[in-house]
Image (spheres, rainbow, N blue to C red):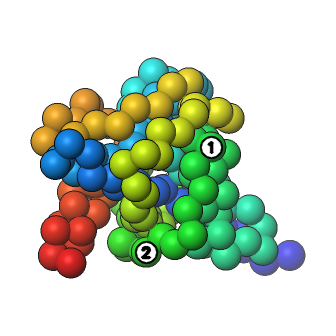
């Protein structure tokens, strides 16, 4: 048996909605360590034989009860130590929903909340970098 990688693949989703003339993103409050009780993007591990986009939609639905038809890839983030558990590479996506969409915390999410992009709380992991890149992509559209 040869080398077995100890690098894991995850997905994260920046979900946008425009409300009261301001752009908002959805964040979850983490139920578990690492970063318990910190705000973070919905996301999680990619299952074996699962496409990245499918994993992103699944994780979003599992943690927020929100389903989306489409997500677009932002980029991959793989800086060592971005996650204290192990070397994790995340592929980040962004999507959009209408202002009527609320969501409900579930699975690993203790709570969820929509935040104006100019009023974000401190975020877990490197999620602020991901959010900034998503905002750049979104505002260039």
Percent x, y of residue 118: 13, 42
Residue at (40, 27) in percent of width and height:
38
Specify few, some or many for label 1: CA neighbours under 10 Å numbering under 14, 14-19, or 20 or more.
Answer: some
Image quadrant in which you'd find residue 76: bottom left
Relative placement, left or right, of 5 versus 49 is left
Reading the image, the residue beneath label 2 is: 72
**Could you tell which of marks 2 and 1 lies nearer the N-terminus?**
1
Residue at (15, 76) in percent of width and height:
140
Residue at (73, 71) in percent of width and height:
50
**Where does the C terminus fall, quadrant-wise?**
bottom left
- Against 28, residue 41 (above or below) is below
Task: Find the residue positioned furthest to the right.
Answer: 1
Indicate which disc residue 65 carries: 1
Judge by depth and name the residue closer to the eye, 128 or 135.
135
Specify few, some or many for label 2: CA neighbours under 10 Å numbering under 14, 14-19, or 20 or more.
Answer: some
Percent x, y of residue 120: 22, 36
- Against 21, residue 13 (above or below) is below
**Where does the N terminus fall, quadrant-wise?**
bottom right
CA gap, disc 2 to disc 1? 19 Å
Q: Secondary structure at mark 2?
A: strand
Percent x, y of residue 16: 34, 55
């Amino acid at each position: 048996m040869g080398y077995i990688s100890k690098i894991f693949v995850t997905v994260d989703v920046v979900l946008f909605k425009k409300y009261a003339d301001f752009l908002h993103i959805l964040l979850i409050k983490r139920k578990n360590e690492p970063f318990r009780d910190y705000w973070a993007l919905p996301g999680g591990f990619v299952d074996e034989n699962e496409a990245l986009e499918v994993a992103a939609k699944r994780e979003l639905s599992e943690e927020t009860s929100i389903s989306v038809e489409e997500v677009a890839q932002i980029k991959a983030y793989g800086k060592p130590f971005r996650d204290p558990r192990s070397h994790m590479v995340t592929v980040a996506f962004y999507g959009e929903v209408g202002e009527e969409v609320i969501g409900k915390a579930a699975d690993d999410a203790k709570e969820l909340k929509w935040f104006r992009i100019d009023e974000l709380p401190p975020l877990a992991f490197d999620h602020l970098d991901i959010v900034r890149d998503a905002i750049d992509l979104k505002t260039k559209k």
